[in-house]
Image: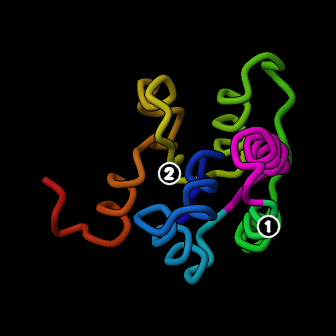
């Protein structure tokens, strides 16, 4: 299993206790995570702009994020980082792309890659008996 997390999921896991944190921990323990450098760039930008009162946040993010093997960034489309991240997940042969972004969730699938919410990912990965 390969799981690619959108930047917002990584950020939620690094800053807040809850589902995203558990998802990252459980996937990391199983060596299922993959990521790309663009996730870190986006995360550091958001942390600097939106969480200046948490100066330790970039280091906390980096410690968590470094658990995942890196795949190469995808350069195109240069004006759509969401599409670039999904393309990187496809190139990495990821099974799931996990995001909270409604626009990206609307894409549903890209090739064999399923695009799901953190809750849907949790059910797929850790509670398959709850699927209908």
User: 130 above or below 63?
Assistant: above
User: 68 above or below 31?
Assistant: above
Query: Residue 50: where, in percent of width, then height?
Result: 70, 41
How many numbered discs?
Answer: 2
- Tell me the residue that label 2 is attached to: 96
Q: Tell me if residue 42 is in the magenta stretch.
A: yes
**Residues at discs 1 and 2 in contact (Cβ within 8 Å):** no
Q: Main secondary structure of the magenta part?
A: helix
- Tell me the residue that label 1 is attached to: 56
**Picture quarter containing residue 28?**
bottom right
User: 64 above or below 29?
Assistant: above
Q: Tell me if residue 40 is in the magenta stretch.
A: yes
Q: Residue at x 60, y 62 (%)?
A: 15
Q: Residue placed farthest to the left in the image?
A: 132
Q: Specify how the rendered protein is coloured.
A: rainbow
Q: Residue placed farthest to the bottom in the image?
A: 29
Q: Residues within 10 Å of mark 2 (few under 14, many from 20)?
A: many
Q: Residue at x 45, y 43 (%)?
A: 114
Is label 2 in a helix, a strand or a loop? strand
Is label 1 in a helix, a strand or a loop? loop
Which of label 1 and label 2 is nearer to you?
1
* Mark 1 vs 2, N-terminal side: 1
Q: Residue at x 48, y 23 (%)?
A: 103
**Residue stretch in magenta:** 34-54
Query: Residue 60: where, in percent of width, then height?
Result: 74, 70
Query: Residue 25: where, in percent of width, then height?
Result: 54, 76
Marks 1 and 2 sit apart, C-alpha to C-alpha, by 29 Å
Q: Residues within 10 Å of mark 1 (few under 14, many from 20)?
A: few
In the depicted view, which residue is nearer to us: 77 or 18? 18
Q: Residue at x 73, y 59 (%)?
A: 54
In the depicted view, which residue is nearer to us: 54 or 58? 54
């Amino acid at each position: 299993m390969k799981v690619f997390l959108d930047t917002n999921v990584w950020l939620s896991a690094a800053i807040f206790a809850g589902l995203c944190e558990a998802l990252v921990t459980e996937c990391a323990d199983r060596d299922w995570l993959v990521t790309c450098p663009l996730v870190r760039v986006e995360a550091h930008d958001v942390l600097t702009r939106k969480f200046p009162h948490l100066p330790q946040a970039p280091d906390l993010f980096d410690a968590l994020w470094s658990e995942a093997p890196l795949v190469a960034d995808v350069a195109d489309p240069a004006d759509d980082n969401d599409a670039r991240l999904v393309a990187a997940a496809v190139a990495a042969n990821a099974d799931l792309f996990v995001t909270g972004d409604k626009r990206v969730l609307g894409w549903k699938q890209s090739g064999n890659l399923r695009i799901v919410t953190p809750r849907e990912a949790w059910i797929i990965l850790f509670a398959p008996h709850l699927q209908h």
